[in-house]
């Protein structure tokens, strides 16, 4: 994935969480996004972190802008560039 959008949703905003998850679902059906994870923040009890991966940077920017338009403040939305890293496959290392 080329980009990752990380959204922090404040406690009490289940409506926003559901709206974002629905949008991710629609994008996912077209192969334009993939939900990476949904987690609760241990440091801010009740807040939810939602991470969405995108193969195209432009789609990630649009998603982030729409999330802000839906009620998230810009500080709660982070657009991250994903850097490719090398990772060895375990099977060939075990059986050369």
Image: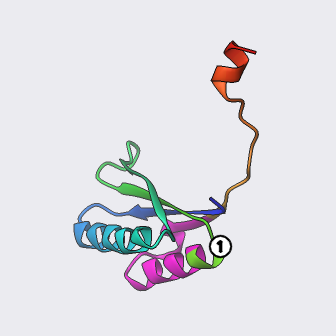
Q: Is residue 52 above or below residue 44?
A: below
Judged left or right of residue 94, residue 12 is: left
Which quadrant: the C terminus? Answer: top right
Q: Residues within 10 Å of mark 1 (few under 14, many from 20)?
A: some
Q: Position of residue 86 (x, y in %)?
A: 76, 39
Task: Please name the residue that numbered disc 1 is placed on.
Answer: 57
Question: What residue is at 30 percent from the left and 67 percent from the top?
Answer: 17
Of residues 72 and 34, the one drawn nearer to the viewer in this rendering: 34
Which stretch did the figure color magenta? 60-79
Q: Position of residue 26 (x, y in %)?
A: 37, 74
Q: Position of residue 16 (x, y in %)?
A: 30, 72
Question: What residue is at 42 percent from the left and 75 percent from the top?
Answer: 72
Q: Is residue 28 above or below residue 90?
A: below
Question: What residue is at 52 percent from the left and 76 percent from the top?
Answer: 64
Of residues 3 and 44, the one drawn nearer to the viewer in this rendering: 3
SS label for mark 1: helix
Q: Position of residue 42 (x, y in %)?
A: 38, 42
Q: Main secondary structure of the magenta part?
A: helix
């Amino acid at each position: 994935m080329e980009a990752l959008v990380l959204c922090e949703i404040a406690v009490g905003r289940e409506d926003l969480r559901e709206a974002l998850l629905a949008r991710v679902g629609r994008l996912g059906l077209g192969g334009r996004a993939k939900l990476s994870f949904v987690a609760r923040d241990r440091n801010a009890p009740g807040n939810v972190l939602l991470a969405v991966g995108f193969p195209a940077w432009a789609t990630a920017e649009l998603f982030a802008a729409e999330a802000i338009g839906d009620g998230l403040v810009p500080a709660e939305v982070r657009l991250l560039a994903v850097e490719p890293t090398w990772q060895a496959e375990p099977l060939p290392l075990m059986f050369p």
